[in-house]
Image (cartoon, rainbow, N blue to C red):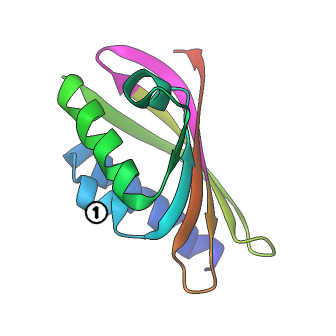
Amino acid sequence: MTRGEAAEFARRWVDAWNRRDLNAVLSHYVADAKFVSPKAEIFTGNSVVEGKEALSRYWHAASSKIRTLEFKFDRVIWDSATAELAIFYEANLNGSRTRACELMKFDEQGRQLSGEALYGAAV
């Protein structure tokens, strides 16, 4: 993946979330992917979600509780040596706006091995 491809991936990722197209977001994950998020603990009892099927269950459960979901793309940082992508964005979840970052690790085929959602300061 080039930096330009990484930025395009990030824009598509944000667009998929804004459409609530969870299948599109999940489509690039490997079956045994690992995802870490403080918000996962609210819905699953654990901040670490293991496996694409468990991730799908978590996101569908969380999405059903969120009235407003809007991500506003900011920028990306791509490290081609480690195949890691950081997407910076503003997250509006039910009117609560925060800075956010998603860290992603990819394999040689461009499939996502892991992700970690980080939430920061209110905006």
| Outermost residue, bottom side | 109
Q: Is residue 94 magenta?
A: yes
Tell me what residue is drawn at x 54 percent, y 48 percent.
Answer: 35
Q: In the drawing, does residue 108 fall left or right of residue 24?
A: right
Closest to the observer, 84 or 9: 84
Circle 1 is placed at which residue position? 24
Total marks placed: 1
- Magenta part, dominant SS: strand
Q: Judging from the image, what secondary structure is the residue with disc 1 in?
A: helix
**Image location (x, y in percent) of residue 85:** 64, 60
Q: Residues within 10 Å of mark 1 (few under 14, many from 20)?
A: some
**Quarter of the image containing the N terminus?**
bottom right
Q: In the drawing, does residue 71 fall left or right of residue 77?
A: left
Please identify the quarter of the rendering in which residue 84 is found. bottom right
**Image location (x, y in percent) of residue 115:** 57, 52
Q: Is residue 38 above or below residue 10?
A: above
Q: Is residue 68 magenta?
A: no
Q: Which residues are magenta?
A: 92-103
Three-letter amino acid code of the residue under disc 1: Ala
Q: Is residue 123 above or below residue 20?
A: above
Tell me what residue is drawn at x 31 percent, y 51 percent.
Answer: 56
**Image location (x, y in percent) of residue 95:** 31, 14
